[in-house]
Image (cartoon, rainbow, N blue to C red):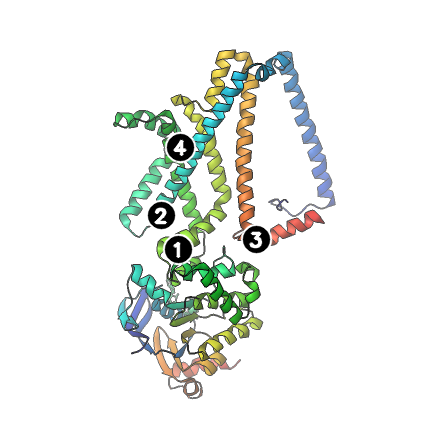
């Protein structure tokens, strides 16, 4: 089932459809030409030789290495996501607190963390924390850096989501006798998350990709493992290995997006807010018809 | 002892004085209808009673005690006062049944099965038993408002506040909501109702309070008020409203 695509125009008429068809054919031809060109160049340089690409079959260690790298990436990403969501919720609550001290502290933290590059936060966790007398492994240094930055960004996403909810929802909950934290947990947050889910997912995908920054502190995630393999086997294996690594990132992030979409659809079948089912039904209807 | 009393209540939004020297007592079982021109402070007064708005002067007593300012006591007081809004404000992400059970389960600590049973009873009573598993936006305005009334009743309140419950409804849905409110009034519920429905005021109210410019200008039983209003403002208002 596909939702109606968001386009900034009226649905095309017959002439418009013909023009779109011709345009698509031209674009396709250009793209195919470029691809063919690239492949011939690579073939000329011997980059497509079967022997190069058989390295994955010939070298079981390579497979293990990349697999381990992927697992390390997933482990850091999963831990980072859980902690960043938790930190994001705390910071969002802090910024919306009645208490001025809390608001001020949370705002300062968010603004500070958001304005620093993730890489700097990771390096700070790796080099700075030990200087302060707290030893951390490369895994935790990476996770702390990712959590700090993404927690701050997520808190802003949560806050924007909560702010977009009609005040009447909060008032109705308060009028029932719910305490402010219960109002947040049971009424504001579920609606905010649903409304902000596209932004949330893309931020989590960014977090997953940013695990590759573990490279600089020698955390053996996917990118570093692959690069190690290229150094060991020789740079003529760079193309196959990096291609496979890229595929691994793409598939992982694709699965993450699919998981999110599936959760979202399951939710909207059960509850649903924000998005109108009318649009979805209409899309389903037009797909069927 | 009155159930609620407002004593010399005053409130401003910035420089805009919205309520001045409001005095009103409501006895248990009484139905008070508040009417008056737009902007006269009816909603604000209604919202002050469960402290959705704070007051600047005077005091409000509920069950003989001043309204708690915050925390657990405020929540406990609000749990005893039902509120129905002009825009329904059903929780958009929960089914109708879950709208009705949220308060009883989280605030009153009732068991879910028990809360659901009671919720279905109430939905039956307001005539939308078949909508229990739907989402608010799948219901018509009149059905949503009846669900919102049922949600408030699920808390077993001792007082119900209505802030223009039918103003957002299409004409053909107004009577289905008013019927539910009439039934509630005759069952002995204490109610404070802000409305423009003069027919409801006449038939269901024990007393009518007429507001203008942030003051209660006149309070009287509906027969007296509608047939012989004492103040110029009320005569003027009724003349304009009842002409249609
Ligand atoms: N949150 C607010 N901030 C500032 N001013 C407000 C706020 N709420 C209400 N007011 C002002 O207070 C005055 C009284 O408003 P209120 O909503 O109580 O009137 P009302 O009698 O309910 O009118 P209506 O019949 O139009 O609903 C109005 O002048 C309004 O602009
Ligand atoms: Mg009003």
Q: Which of marks 4 and 3 is nearer the N terminus?
A: 4
Looking at the picture, tell me which residue is in the foreground, B115 or B177. Answer: B115
Residue A21 at x, y percent in the picture: 72, 37
Q: Eyeballing the image, is A159 above or below A122?
A: below
Q: Which of marks 4 and 2 is nearer the N terminus?
A: 2
- Report the residue marked by disc 4: A146
Q: Is mark 4 within 8 Å of ligand 1?
A: no
Q: Name the residue under label 2.
A: A93
Distance (Cα) linking label 4 and label 3: 34 Å
Q: Residue at x 47, y 24 (%)?
A: A69
CA gap between label 3 and label 1 equals 24 Å
Q: What element carries label 2?
A: helix
Q: Is residue A114 above or below residue B210?
A: above
The percent coordinates of residue A132 (x first, y second) are 25, 28
Q: Where is residue A288 in the image (x, y as percent from the top left)?
A: 70, 48
Labels 4 and 1 positioned on one and the same chain: yes
Residue A183, disc: 1
Residue identifier under label 3: A276
Q: In this rendering, which labeled residue sits more in front, label 3 or label 1?
A: 1
């Amino acid at each position: 089932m596909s939702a109606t695509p968001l386009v900034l125009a009226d649905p095309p008429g017959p002439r418009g459809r013909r023009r779109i068809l011709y345009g698509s054919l031209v674009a396709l031809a250009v793209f195919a030409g470029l691809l063919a060109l690239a492949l011939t160049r690579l073939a000329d340089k011997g980059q497509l030789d079967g022997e190069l690409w058989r390295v994955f079959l010939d070298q079981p260690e390579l497979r293990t290495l990349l697999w381990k790298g992927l697992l390390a990436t997933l482990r850091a990403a999963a831990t980072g996501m859980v902690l960043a969501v938790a930190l994001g919720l705390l910071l969002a609550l802090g910024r919306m607190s009645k208490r001025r001290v809390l608001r001020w502290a949370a705002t300062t933290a968010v603004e500070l963390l958001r304005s620093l590059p993730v890489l700097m936060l990771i390096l700070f966790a790796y080099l700075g924390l030990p200087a302060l007398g707290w030893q951390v492994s490369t895994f935790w240094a990476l996770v702390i850096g990712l959590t700090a930055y993404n927690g701050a960004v997520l808190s802003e996403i949560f806050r924007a989501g909560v702010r977009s909810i009609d005040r009447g929802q909060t008032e109705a909950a308060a009028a029932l006798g719910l305490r402010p934290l219960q109002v947040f947990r049971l009424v504001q947050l579920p609606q905010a998350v649903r409304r902000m889910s596209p932004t949330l997912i893309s931020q989590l995908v960014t977090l997953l990709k940013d695990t590759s920054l573990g490279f600089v502190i020698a955390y053996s995630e996917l990118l570093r493992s692959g690069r190690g393999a290229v150094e060991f086997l020789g740079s003529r294996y760079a193309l196959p290995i990096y291609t496979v690594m890229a595929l691994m990132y793409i598939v992982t992030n694709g699965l993450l997006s699919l998981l999110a979409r599936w959760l979202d659809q399951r939710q909207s079948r059960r509850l649903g807010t924000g998005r109108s089912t009318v649009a979805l039904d209409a899309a389903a209807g037009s797909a069927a018809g | 002892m009155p159930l609620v009393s407002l004593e010399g209540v005053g409130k401003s939004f910035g420089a805009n004085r919205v309520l001045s020297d409001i005095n009103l007592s409501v006895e248990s079982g009484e139905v008070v209808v508040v009417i008056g021109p737009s902007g006269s402070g009816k909603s604000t007064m209604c919202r002050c009673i469960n402290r959705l708005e704070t007051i600047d002067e005077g005091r409000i007593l509920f069950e003989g005690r001043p309204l708690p300012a915050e925390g657990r006591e405020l929540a406990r007081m609000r749990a005893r006062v039902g509120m129905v809004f002009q825009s329904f404000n059903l929780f958009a992400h929960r089914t109708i049944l879950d709208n009705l059970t949220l308060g009883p389960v989280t605030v009153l600590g009732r068991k879910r099965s028990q809360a659901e049973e009671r919720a279905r009873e109430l939905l039956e009573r307001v005539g939308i038993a078949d909508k229990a598993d739907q989402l608010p936006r799948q219901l018509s305005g009149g059905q949503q408002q009846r669900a919102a009334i049922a949600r408030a009743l699920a808390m077993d309140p001792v007082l119900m506040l209505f802030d223009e419950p039918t103003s957002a409804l299409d004409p053909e849905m107004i009577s289905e909501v008013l019927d539910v409110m009439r039934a509630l009034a005759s069952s002995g519920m204490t109610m404070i109702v802000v409305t423009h429905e003069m027919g409801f005021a006449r038939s269901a109210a024990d007393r009518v309070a007429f507001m203008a410019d942030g003051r209660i200008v006149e309070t009287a039983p509906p027969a007296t008020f509608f047939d012989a209003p004492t103040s110029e403002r009320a005569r003027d208002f009724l003349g304009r409203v009842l002409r249609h």
